[in-house]
Image (cartoon, grey):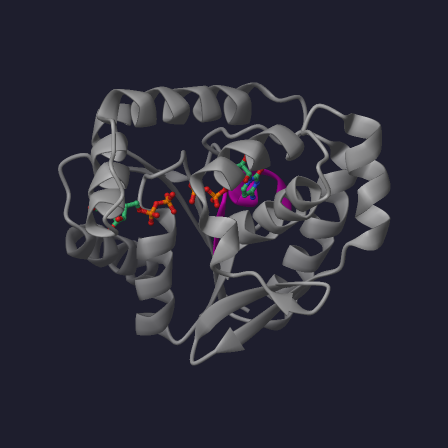
Amino acid sequence: MYNIAIDGPAGAGKSTIAKIVAKELGFIYVDTGAMYRTIALACFRAGIKADESEKVIAKLDDIEVTLGYDNGTQKVYLNGEDVSLEIRREEIGNMTSAIAVYEKVRENMVEMQRELAAKNDVVMDGRDIGTAVLPNADLKIYLTASSRTRAERRCKELVEKGVNCDIDTVEKDIIDRDYRDMHREISPLTQAEDAVLVDSSNMSIDEVVKEIIKLKNER
Ligand code: CDP
Ligand code: CDP
């Protein structure tokens, strides 16, 4: 199986780019962030706060996260309910990075991700794919962009949805989330030694896609 790992901070363009690369190559796209977001959503709905570690871990026994594919689009289910849209809420994203620190939360997710990659050609995006989940991936990309660029991209998305956006607040949330993701004890976000760094601050989506396909073809 051919495995491509794409890691990087929030808003770097990982999911947008991974989705297109997977489509062009006929691979499956695996959005690992969606899996962690689903756990956060279940806790949120149960009124559990991210720092209530014992409650979060106890809640895991009631949660079954499953993935499905609809016309190549990944769907994520919480105990059978399609939550693919609900997990995208900004507050769920912020809560997710706070629950993703717990080892128990990561264990099951990583096992599912490895199984998918063993059985399929995949483009998998997340924070720890190249470093922890698939250390032997055939191609590893560390995709990043400046925090201001990433905040601008997020705001553009919100404004298009008719939601007001304060760029400074969004950038601060992004910086806080990066800090939590990069400084946690277990599988922090870091560039794998053998990952290719792609800074998309001044690159279009199309240019990033072409760069990744080129890197794949060179191997
Ligand atoms: O998955 P991740 O959080 O890394 O980022 P994303 O949700 O794929 O991308 C965030 C936003 O940036 C989306 O609206 C993309 O369309 C946009 N983007 C961009 O404008 N230029 C790029 N080179 C990459 C992404
Ligand atoms: O799309 P965006 O970059 O905003 O976030 P995401 O990829 O959906 O991930 C949400 C959060 O899940 C991240 O901030 C990480 O804390 C966590 N995550 C993780 O710990 N490990 C992964 N492989 C993927 C996501």
- Where residue 142 sits, quadrant-wise, is top left
- What is the magenta range? 124-133
Determine whether 159 is above or below 31 in the image.
Answer: above
Comparing 123 with 13, the one in front is 13
Queried whether the magenta region covers residue 131, the answer comes back as: yes
Queried whether the magenta region covers residue 153, the answer comes back as: no
Would you say 212 lies left or right of 68 here? left
Would you say 13 lies left or right of 89 here? left
**Quadrant of the image containing the N terminus:** bottom right
Q: Position of residue 2 (x, y in %)?
A: 50, 65
Q: Position of residue 59 (x, y in %)?
A: 81, 43
Determine whether 114 is above or below 149 in the image.
Answer: below
Report how many numbered discs are placed on residues in the image: 0
Comparing 88 with 219, the one in front is 88
Comparing 81 with 127, the one in front is 81
Q: Position of residue 74 (x, y in %)?
A: 49, 67
Determine whether 73 is above or below 111 in the image.
Answer: below
**Quadrant of the image containing the C terminus:** bottom left
**Residue under the image location 71 percent in, 37 percent down:** 47
**Residue under the image location 75 percent in, 34 percent down:** 103
**Residue under the image location 52 percent in, 51 percent down:** 87
Q: Position of residue 135 (x, y in %)?
A: 59, 45
Residue at the outermost bottom position: 71
Residue 157 seen by the camera: yes
Would you say 53 lies left or right of 87 here? right
Residue 135 seen by the camera: no
**Residue under the image location 51 percent in, 30 percent down:** 189
